[in-house]
Amino acid sequence: MKKFTLYILLLVFSKSFAQELNLPVFTQYLADNAFVISPTYAGIGDNFRIRANGLTQWVGIKNAPDNQSLYADFRISNRSAVGISAYNDRNGNTRQKGLKLSFAHHLTLNYTTKSFLSFGISYNINAFRIAIENFNTTDDIPIVDPSIVDDRSTSNSNFDVGILYRYKDFYISFNANNILGKDIDQFFEEEPSKLLNYQLYTGYVFTNPYNKKIEYEPSLFYQRFDSDGRSSTDLNFKYRKWNRDGDYYWIGGSYRFLNDQFFKPLNVGPMAGIMHNGLYFAYAYQLTINDLSRFNSGTHVITIGIDFMQGASNCPCTQGTSWRKYR
């Protein structure tokens, strides 16, 4: 029990530092919404797309991380698009809220080979606070530190930049997130000032040669933090089946690991989703493969969404890989 308590304390403190670096990315981006990880995807696909995510981590552990987020993106011209996202994140006694405004521009490199290049930029503003009103006394700490009397909060602004290349059914994007440093605040002497992290997302959509409405999509998501060099990778796979009306369902799975521990996954689990008449629903489950697995029932992610104001752009550079077939 003592080992488990120590593990929880270390995890909470490390997560408190990491929380201000970047929002936790689980499988939200796999719910047909790559805009979660890159502004370059704004405007690709239908004209107006909204996705809402609810994420509950480590169900069964008190005060475990909990996150809600909302994403919307739409085209403002044949080649350009804007997007907005907002989130609310809770982890123990830490609270974080943020807003992100994005812009993307898409170029056609070659109409014949269907090769496209996209650029994106996001402005982020984040508010971080410690919920001192929830501090309670314990047997070991019978009195709350009387010096903690004010609202321990701070905010910061930053930028993300990204580039996306698509060639037929292949795609690869690269992002540099939080490219500006941050002033050290008064909370912790060890607080990191480097917020920069890199993300790479790539995959390929294979069409079944015997049934054009069936697709297979393996993908990879890589993330590396510049402050300490830690990195992780997601290996994903999706099966998608379309109908004549452009509706579809998909099932898949994801395997996340630290890059120096391939055979010791952090999370692994199934996921599935469905699109019908412009309404979208997806669910993902991830089992945490470490000492915490004995004390919780896993992480659950639910995504709901809607696509509307559908209208194809005059430029094929804004048409997604699958949308080219049935839209």
Image (cartoon, helix red, strand yellow):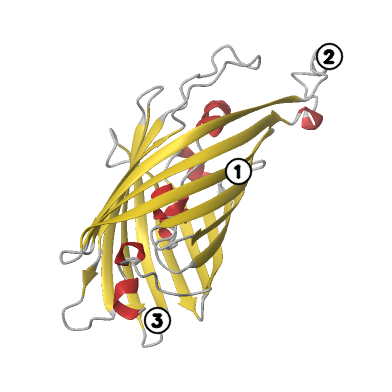
Q: Which residue is mark 2?
A: 146
Determine whether 181 is above or below 168 in the image: above
Determine whether 77 is above or below 259 in the image: below
Q: Which residue is mark 1?
A: 99
In percent of width and height, residue 21 lies at 51, 31
In percent of width and height, residue 144 lies at 81, 19
Q: Which residue is drawn at the image coordinates 41% and 86% (left, top)?
A: 245
Give the structural element (helix, strand or loop) at label 1.
Answer: strand
Determine whether 85 is above or below 273 in the image: above
Determine whether 323 is above or below 61 in the image: below
Q: CA distance from mark 2 to mark 3?
A: 62 Å
Tell me the kind of residue under disc 2.
Answer: Pro
Q: Residue 265 versus residue 148: which sits nearer the camera?
A: 148
Q: Which residue is drawn at the image coordinates 43% and 40% (left, top)?
A: 290
Q: Residue 123 versus residue 20: which sits nearer the camera?
A: 123
The number of numbered badges drawn on the structure is 3
| Upstream in sequence: badge 2 or badge 1 | 1
Tell me the kind of residue under disc 3.
Answer: Gly
In percent of width and height, residue 283 lies at 50, 64
Pointer 3: residues within 10 angstroms few (<14), some, or many (20+)? some
Name the mark on residue 246.
3
In percent of width and height, residue 267 lies at 41, 47
Q: Which residue is drawn at the image coordinates 40% and 78% (left, top)?
A: 248
Tell me the kind of residue under disc 1.
Answer: Leu
Residue placed farthest to the bottom in the image? 244
Relative placement, left or right, of 145 versus 261 is right
Q: Residue 181 versus residue 102: which sits nearer the camera?
A: 102
Q: Quadrant of the N terminus?
A: top right
Pointer 2: residues within 10 angstroms few (<14), some, or many (20+)? few
Name the mark on residue 175.
none
Nearest to viewer (mark 2 / mark 3): 3
Pointer 1: residues within 10 angstroms few (<14), some, or many (20+)? some
